[in-house]
Amino acid sequence: MIADEEEQLYSIALTMIHGVGHISAKRLVDGMGSAVDVFRHRKSLPDSLPEVSSRIIEALDDPQALTRAEQELLFIQKNRIRCLTLNDADYPFRLRECEDAPIVLFFKGNTDLNALRVINLVGTRHITGYGEQACASFLRDLKVLCPDVLVVSGLAYGVDIHAHRGALANGLSTVAVLAHGLDRIYPSVHRKTAVDMLTNGGLLTEFLTGTAPDRYNFVSRNRIVAGMCDATIVVESAAKGGSLITAELTEGYHRDCFAFPGRINDEYSAGCNRLLRDNKASLLLSAEEFVSAMGWNSVPPSKAAHVQRGFFPDLSEEEQKVVSILEKQGDLQINSLVVEADISVQRMSGILFELEMKGIIRVLVGGVYQLLP
């Protein structure tokens, strides 16, 4: 077995260990460097990770976890499904930065999960004509402004399926994050759309085959939807609903959240209006405003030519790298800088803080960073 396959096998097995949740699994892998080493050095785990209990060490001896993992690995290989571990370069880097990120993902499709710009559209399953129109017009206009954006949702009834279909209709890549394994499609009436997505997007899940779309899986799924994106857009939502959970997760991950407003008496705008009232989401009226707020505007040639800076002798190599990117591309949001510079979100935050303190950059509305003249 090659190294990648071995890491996939043990990553899958780790998800089967009783008493190991999302956060603890990621801490184990991060702490030991790989899932392979978590199992290989399980007896000495407390030496590197003192918080690991004896109960977890005993659970790691369970042979059934590896047996089940071997079965899953055979399934994904047979069906040409990509198995993405935390150490895989194709694993969504935005999601990897979240403390509760899944240690393994299964992906069927052809898109880049680390696209330069990634958004999700979520909302009620009882979408109204207003929501359908808002979703359709937003994606149509967004295609013109950001033709390379990746649209993420959950394949559910209502806003989700309209987001996927709207993306496909406009030639945008779209990914569905599922609350079950890749051995089924739920709801089954969305199968054709799911198949269409395989040629311009794909299907993504953390769940093994045989996993039913139980209610609590959708809540777990929402953290992936929020974590792998630059921004969450709530199209329509009642006073309670899964999209509001996604919005809360977005805030916790320090990502941007937007919401379309609605009339005060509309049941399926109550959640959006509350997000706006509580300053948990920014008002969204058009694709143009969204692109501007995210700092995704194209840089006019005149501006790009005007900014001519030399090397700053008092900057570190990483700081100079960030400055050079801003010189070349203009104003950018932190997640765009992370992609361009190939620097972690946490490290990038520190670099940007230092540059701001040195008077090199400033922060604009929407978390956009701009070089000072």
Image (cartoon, helix red, strand yellow):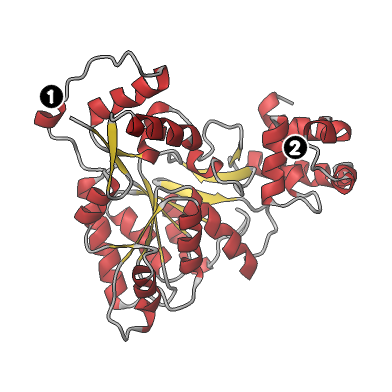
Residue that lies at the very extreme toward the left in this rendered image? 302
Label 2: which secondary element: helix
Report the amino acid beneath label 2: Tyr
- Residue 60 coordinates in the image, percent (x, y): 85, 42
The answer to whether residue 178 of the structure is visible from this angle is no
- The numbered mark, 2 or 1, whose residue comes first in the sequence reads 2
**Viewer-nearest residue: 217 or 212:** 217
The residue that appears at 39% across and 30% down in the rendered structure is 354
Give the quarter of the image for residue 274: bottom left
Q: Is residue 147 above or below residue 34?
A: below
The answer to whether residue 222 of the structure is visible from this angle is yes
Q: Is residue 157 left or right of residue 330?
A: right
Residue placed under numbered mark 1 in the picture: 305
**Cα–Cα span, label 2 and label 1:** 51 Å
- Residue 109 coordinates in the image, percent (x, y): 48, 44
Label 2 Cα crowd, 10 Å radius (few <14 / some 14-19 / many 20+): many
The residue that appears at 84% across and 36% down in the rendered structure is 46
Which corner quadrant holds the C terminus?
top left
**Viewer-nearest residue: 20 or 193:** 20
